[in-house]
Amino acid sequence: FRLNLMTEELGELAQAVTKGKPKKDFIEENVDLFNLIIGNMISTGVTLEEFDKVFWKKWEKIMNRKKKKVNGKFRVSDFKK
């Protein structure tokens, strides 16, 4: 059920971005999605300490990925040569 709600909220976030809605709508849709993510952690018993540890480990991995400049912005996706 929660994943369905996340899919719905992600769709609303995508619309806020692609349809050029006001910044407040973009923020609101992110808050909705963030609240569902917090609910996922709580309902599955993930502690703040567990989340914090994994978050920063993943963040470091992303920050250390090979970067490529595309249209003036950096991407950290996997690239094919």
Image (tube, rainbow, N blue to C red):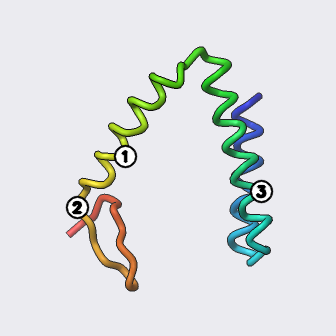
Q: How many marks?
A: 3
In the drawing, what numbered circle is on residue 2? none
Q: Secondary structure at mark 3?
A: helix
Residue 20 lies, with reference to residue 35, above or below; the image says below
Residue 55 lies, with reference to residue 69, above or below; the image says above
Lower position in the chain sequence, tag 2 or tag 3: 3
In the drawing, what numbered circle is on residue 28? 3
| Residue type at tag 3 | Glu
Q: What residue is pinned by disc 1?
A: 59
* Quadrant position of the N terminus in the picture: top right
Within 10 Å of disc 2 (Cα), the crowding (few <14, some 14-19, many 20+) is few
The residue sitting at 65% across, 27% down in the picture is 40
Which residue is the extreme one toward the left?
A: 81
Frontmost residue, 29 versus 8: 29
The residue sitting at 78% across, 66% down in the picture is 24
Lower position in the chain sequence, tag 1 or tag 2: 1
Q: What residue is pinned by disc 2?
A: 66
Q: Position of residue 26 (x, y in %)?
A: 73, 64
Q: Secondary structure at mark 2?
A: loop
Q: Position of residue 81 (x, y in %)?
A: 20, 70
Cα separation between marks 3 and 1: 24 Å
Cα separation between marks 2 and 3: 32 Å
